[in-house]
Amino acid sequence: MKRTNIELDEKLLEEGKKATGIKTSKALVDFALKELIRKYKQKRILDLKGKIDWSGNLDEMRALRDI
C-alpha cells in the first residue's frame, strides 16, 4: 500500500460519497481508481471488435455446457 498526500476537491468528494454511499475519502478514491481501470479494460476489449477472426458453432458449445 502506498501512502501519499494529495489535494482533492472537497465538493467532488462529498458528491462522490453521496452518489455511492461510500463513507470515507480513501475508500472513495480506491473505488474511483478501480472503476477507471475497469472501464479502461472494457474499452480495450470493445476496440477488438471486428479484429479477431473466430469460427465455431455456438449451438454446439452451448449443448456441451449443458452436459
Image: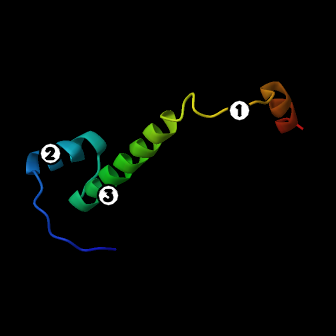
Numbered badge on residue 12: 2
Q: Is there a contact, CB below 8 Å, between mark 3 and mark 2?
A: no
Rendered-image quadrant of the C terminus: top right
The amino acid pointed to by label 2 is: Leu
Res 25 quadrant in image: bottom left
Q: Identify the residue shown where x is 29% and y is 46%.
A: 21
Kind of residue sitting beneath label 1:
Trp
Q: Quadrant of residue 23?
A: bottom left
Left or right: 16, with 50 as reference point: left
Q: How far across and how far down the image is residue 32, in percent?
A: 30, 50
Q: Secondary structure at mark 3?
A: helix
The quadrant holding residue 12 is: top left
According to the picture, the residue beneath numbered tag 3 turns out to be 30
Numbered badge on residue 54: 1
Q: Residue at point 87% right, 36% down?
A: 64
Q: Residues within 10 Å of mark 3 (few under 14, many from 20)?
A: few
Q: Amino acid at mark 3?
A: Asp
Q: Where 5 sits versus 28, above or below?
A: below
Helix, strand or loop for disc 1 = loop
